[in-house]
Amino acid sequence: MDKFLININGELFNEEKAKISVFDRGFLYGDSVYEATRTFNRIPFRIQHHLDRLFFSAQKIELELTYSRKEILELILQTIKASPHNDIFLRIILTRGTNIDLGLDPELSSKNNLIIITKAITPNPDWWLTKGLSMIFHNKKSSERGPLPKTGKYLENILAYKDATEKGAFDSIMVNTAGHVTEGTTSNIWMIKDNIIYTPSLQDGVLDGLTRKTLIQMADRNNLMLQEISLTQEDFLGADECFITSTTRNLVPVTIIEGRPVGNGLPGKKTLELLKMYLEFVSLQ
Ligand code: PLP
């Protein structure tokens, strides 16, 4: 069986056959936006929110859409239907289009290219929950603030990830130029101190993660104390518990930061309770 099923502008391919022009602006300039999501038993997770964020990202980079929201949704649903798997990972990439010549001018581009890459979801490794992750801090050079668009521009995150793996850690916790903690390279970051759940404010330059949004909603419904505020490296080093979130990984405990144990160095009890609660919460959606 093929590992991937890929939809390119409405046509389905396996990984061998899926090809896109070298003049595509996503390839040439990172001139694209994207979403990463999953299905739970063939139902796409919070798809309307993902489409909202895709449109927000496109608007932020002034990427003119030649696909309507309805067409994008139909192509997503067509791909899910054609997949042999019930639980799949989906990457939905929308590029400004294929250039008719080299050059930055967006007017050189044709219609958007919409690429949906899918594969079966691989379960999180057990050790993530029994041992937890180790992270380091990484200073960002860019001074972007506010909720970030999800674009093809991931170089800073790639370098932050590389920095972490070269130092033997799982990933980096990125810190903005004002010294405020922002997020992981492909996840949002959280800490718990004295029973209060904290996550960095979107204003510090953070992706408005859908797992983040869902957890905030869940906390609100269950009267859990949660704050979105600016947080420092010292706050994280003094936390009782820490964890990351993303759509494909849910909640994963972080037990070591900069080589030092978080709390007692074991996956946090409250984090694991929140994970259980989260999985129940999303299954009810
Ligand atoms: N932050 C960054 C930079 C990401 O790339 C991602 C996911 O890809 C997230 C946060 C988590 O977002 P979500 O919960 O929507 O998957």
Image: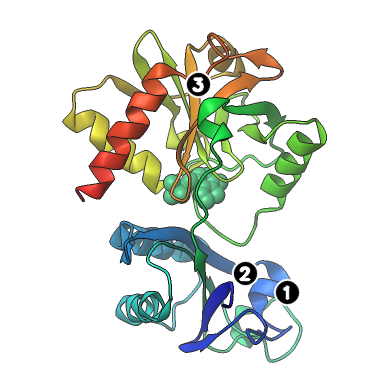
As drawn, 91 above or below 244 = below
Quadrant including the N terminus? bottom right
As drawn, 171 above or below 253 = below
Whole-angstrom CA distance, mark 3 to mark 1, is 42 Å
Nearer the observer, 200 or 191: 191
Q: Residues within 10 Å of mark 2 (few under 14, many from 20)?
A: many
Q: Element at badge 2?
A: loop
Q: Which mark is residue 31?
A: 2
Nearer the observer, 84 or 5: 84
Q: Which mark is residue 190?
A: none
Nearer the observer, 173 or 249: 249
Please tell me which of labels 3 and 2 falls first in the chain: 2
Q: Residues within 10 Å of mark 3 (few under 14, many from 20)?
A: many
Q: Which mark is residue 28?
A: 1
* Residue depicted at 35% across the width and 78% down the height: 81
Would you say the beta carbon of the disc 3 residue lies within 8 angstroms of ligand 1? no
